[in-house]
Amino acid sequence: MSPPGTYPRRNAFFDAGSSQGSAFSVSSTGVRTIQDSTKRPPRVNRQIRISPVRVIGADGSQLGILEVDAALSMAQELGLDLVEVAAAARPPVVRIMDFGKFKFEQAKQARLAKKKQHVIHLKEVKYRPGIDDHDFDTKTRHARQFLEDGNKVKVTLMFRGRQIAHPELGRAVVERVSQQLADLAKIESAPTMEGKSMTMILAPK
């Protein structure tokens, strides 16, 4: 125990880790743990505390291992920033760059990637046995549009009353749909009976 009026000395490792944002910490059990810092934004300029550092020039050239103050001076002379790009390396790797422009380009690329993303939906188009040509063409045109948009189509043939006793009538309609859309669709799931319905799934080619 510590003498009265005094306080136990804090763990020196803990002090250093707290003051410098170390990825290490000491738990109450005395076991060192590593915190996940992968999502932490890169350190820039004076935020970079570890020295020396391995420096990459603005043109991608290797400038060697320098004291962080010297590397920062080089960046400032060029009107650029010193950015830590590999904090886990020993020594850490830094690069001279325009950090504002770098962030802008990253945000731009993220927006473009998000714009190019397409979520595939399963659209359903319902038919009935004995459907007339006009309704058939209208529904099939909708199915074609869904496929052209990159979505899958669930073709559902619904039976009423005694129609269920003649599944071949429904199958003929479903097969007609697949033939009409064969130029841009493939059968992902063959026609199957589900209660009083027959279903088939088409996917874009």
Image: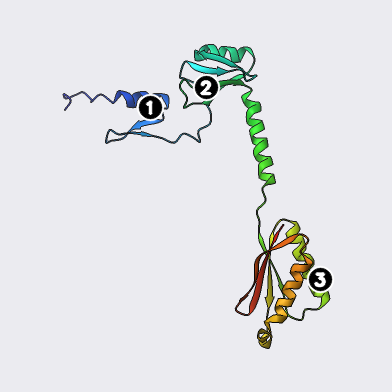
Residue at x-position 19% and y-position 24%: 5
Residue 185 position by quadrant: bottom right
Separation of marks 1 and 3 at Cα, in angstroms: 71 Å
Residue 170 appears at what percent x and percent y? 71, 78
At label 2, the amino acid type is Val
Q: Is residue 14 left or right of residue 84?
A: left
Residue 70 appears at what percent x and percent y? 53, 11
Q: Residue furthest right?
A: 134
Residue 73 appears at what percent x and percent y? 57, 12
Disc 1 versus disc 3: nearer the observer: 3
Residue at x-position 64% and y-position 16%: 79
Whichever of labels 1 and 3 marks the residue nearer the N terminus, that label is: 1
Residue to which mark 2 is pinned: 93
Residue 182 appears at what percent x and percent y? 76, 64
Q: What SS does tag 3 mark?
A: helix
Residue at x-position 76% and y-position 57%: 148
Separation of marks 3 and 2 at Cα, in angstroms: 64 Å
Residue to which mark 3 is pinned: 137
Residue to which mark 1 is pinned: 18
> Vertical placement of 73 versus 180: above or below?
above
